[in-house]
Amino acid sequence: MSTTIDIARDALLLPANLQDHHLDQVMDQLLAARIDAADIYFQSSRLESWVLEDGIIKEGAYNIEQGVGVRAISGEKTGFAYTDEIELPSLLEAGKTARAIARSGGQGSIRVKSLPAGRQYYEPINPLETLTETGKVELLHRLDAEARRQDPRVIQVIASLVAAHDIVLVAGSDGNLSGDVRPLVRCNVHVIVEQEGRREQGSSGGGARQGFHFFLDQERALGYAREAVRQALVNLDAIAAPAGTMPVVLGPGWPGILLHEAIGHGLEGDFNRKGTSAFSGRIGERVATELCTVVDDGTLPGRRGSLSMDDEGTPGQNTVLIENGILKGYMHDRLNARLMGTESTGNGRRESYAHLPMPRMTNTYMLPGEDDPGEIIASVDKGLYAVNFGGGQVDITSGKFVFSASEAYLIENGRITSPVKGATLIGNGPDVLTRVSMVGNDLALDAGVGTCGKEGQSVPVGVGQPSLKVDELTVGGTN
Amino acid sequence: MNDLKDRQTQLQQMVADMLREAADRGASAAEAGVNFDVGLSVNVRLGEVETIEHTRDQGMGISVYFGHKKGSASTSDFKPDAIRDTVRAACNIAKFTTEDPYAGLADADRMVSEQVDLDLYHPWEIDVTEAIERGIECETAARDLDPRITNSEGATLNSHSGLQVYGNSHGFIGGYPSSNHSLSCSVIGQQGESMQRDYWYTSERNPEELESAQAVGRRAGERTLARLGARQIKTCEAPVIFQAEMAVGLLRSLTGAISGSALYRRSSFLLDHLNQPIFPEFVRIHENPLLPGGPASAPFDSEGVATAAKEFVRDGILQSYVLSSYSARKLNMESTGNAGGVRNLSIDSGELDLAGLLRQMGSGLLISELMGSGLNMVTGDYSRGAAGFWVENGEIQFPVEEITIAGNMKEMFAGLQAVATDVERRGSIRTGSWLLQPMMIAGS
């Protein structure tokens, strides 16, 4: 089997007849300016999606995207240009544009060399080819049937399958040439149920850096169909959510979006280098109860947020953000690490060759504690138990964050009672983990559906956490 | 400028080639679109340039129909081989999709026949040095406003020019160039331990119509300063005003709820409300896609259907859904020329300015920021994070943060009290501030 770097070279350099000495030429041209660092990022992506709706395969789409981005850095300044033509003249043109950020008079000469691959956290496969078209279509029909079989109140099922095959090659001004082949698959089921004129929705899904067999193993995808219907039916009976500040118990897994919004973004290196985050300058301080240890881990095998290497060629890492309540570190790309006098943590990510890298999360989760989840619920007199969420958002400067529950229940006298309608929860990032009084022994990671947006760039991420109790959080209901 | 005109001929030829390739492969119908955009983005921070990005984006997409079976594909690679591969991929996909009687092109007699010039293209010959100077002038105006402005995310100048071409196998092919230029600034204020950030921007088709760099900077600084000292309020029920920029989101939710795809899926809180009152009687909501120089103006929709001015709400009654040809067929109706969305939607303002609206409210919450995506489109249940100002006797008292507002959007629409004259004009939806009936506010 070919190594990752060979696959990447064959996909990106060979068709354009680009040799290593051509890369040297582009790099030398960049280094003719007084720059601190530069990189050339080649990318080829193939994306395929299929949608079932009204019981028929309604849409299928295939997307080809490829190009190369050239970046030159001088101090805090970045020059950037890109082209979708992977050819030497276009590369040289982009390089000339990018290096204009710095004064001329630099000197240096680089001979790029291929780096041996480091540890790989996923197979360098093309997921589009792991199932036939007929197989994909059949899987969607099975999801539709499974959802409708659950309950006659199901009136609409939308099921989708997406696979992406992303091949990248990064040449850095340190002379290293590294490559990565990133498979990604995702499946979603969305249902509408109707009962006596009242309608509700539910959705569920999952994904991984694997092939489509991920969804077939133990009929995993059929579970999404059942889960979507279960959620929708629960919501049919939901009563108004409470309004005000109260104890909130968050379920395991996807509710870890709390960590992503409340803590994660505020610990990204760019905001902290600039001093614009509510966490700026707080390394070594207590930002959580000692029950809380939070990591960002790009090394989990096959996970949606995992990276064998980031988009600057730095190997994926497991970075401790908070240890026993103490803030330990930020997440860095190379630019911000250099300006802050530290090393990249393998968090330099970009949406594509047409975007600049910046510090981004991979899989962010809290390590398990010792509490029994049942006892956590039993400890609450009157509060909210939230188990499923839609999206979230944070203002990293004020620290205020929100995340919106899509499945939640009242806790009354230590017991889970009525389901309540979706409600947004709001809190202050630097405070929220100081109010965590119980952490469950039931760590779970999400099913693999997260996408994070920052400054207009989307990247796949993961989250996770054990059940946990926040003593006070503001719940945005109507009652 | 000549460059883009030449390019238009070239892109139209590419669309024609793709359509022919699809026909050669046996497709009974096809539609294709190409876009091309070049731009400059310059960001300055703390008086120094931080990033200079030269952007150049292109893409083409095709949908093919074999009878009523559809397949789509797109590419950013414009080499002839890649284009052929793309058409082939679309045709291959159509082998596996299901016969869908509603799928197909929009009707031939709805194609725009004469394409008027909507004054959308004003290229800006700005060089990098001048862009940096403007950015610095903008950021400096914000930073010099007050010593409490302690940090900055910088100012960004963007200038883009592009082309869009669309064609289909009815023989329709059309395209037009357009431009967009903007200048934005975001600064941080500090009071005690707490920091606040806010921003302002100006965005125009014609660079001469941009607000001055100083005005943008000052406004960003003033907005940041106004937030300093924000605090939570107690959980309560109170009337609310959505400041114009936030009211845009309410109208966006309306267009989502009356869009054909939400309706045929029975996933809208405004299902079966055509010709029913959804707002009080004074409300009129309409779109003007042919507005010269408008931010969302277009001579035809994304299926080639001629666009035209129309009312969606008159006397508070829902007059029309937002339909593409596909959703129209599903609902047994006619396309409203809204494939790709609404264009220059606006709601008529009343007579009060924002100060007048505050007086009409008396005591309540003025909302200047919303967080999260807490709208359930199926039920209309609404719950979002918010920040803004507490108002008493029509006067702003103090800034507010870390609260949520909640209600049901159907009731929010029905309870609209007044729309102010402070119209937000920068995007595809135009509105003044909205005064609504009391909503539940969750705080401490």
Image (cartoon, coloured by chain):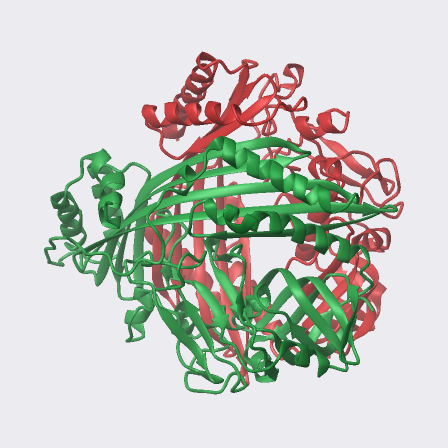
Relative image position of residue B136 (x, y in whole percent): 40, 62
Which chain appears green?
A
Relative image position of residue A383 (x, y in whole percent): 74, 77
Q: Which is nearer the eye, A122 or B310? A: A122
Q: Residue at x 44, y 36 (%)?
A: A63
Q: Residue at x 32, y 27 (%)?
A: B79
Q: Left of B330 or right of it: where is A69? A: left
Relative image position of residue A161 (x, y in whole percent): 53, 42
Q: Is residue B248 visible?
A: no
Q: Left of B70 or right of it: where is A350? A: left
Q: Which is nearer the eye, A23 or B92? A: B92
Q: In which quadrant is the N terminus of chain B drawn? A: top left
Q: Left of A281 or right of it: where is B372? A: right
Residue A117 to residue B236: above or below: above
Q: Is residue A416 visible?
A: yes
Residue A266 to residue B341: above or below: below
Query: Residue furthest toward the front?
Result: A218
Q: Residue at x 13, y 49 (%)?
A: A24
Which chain appears red?
B
Q: Which is nearer the eye, B127 or B284? A: B284
Q: Residue at x 71, y 48 (%)?
A: B253
Q: Left of A60 or right of it: where is B286? A: right
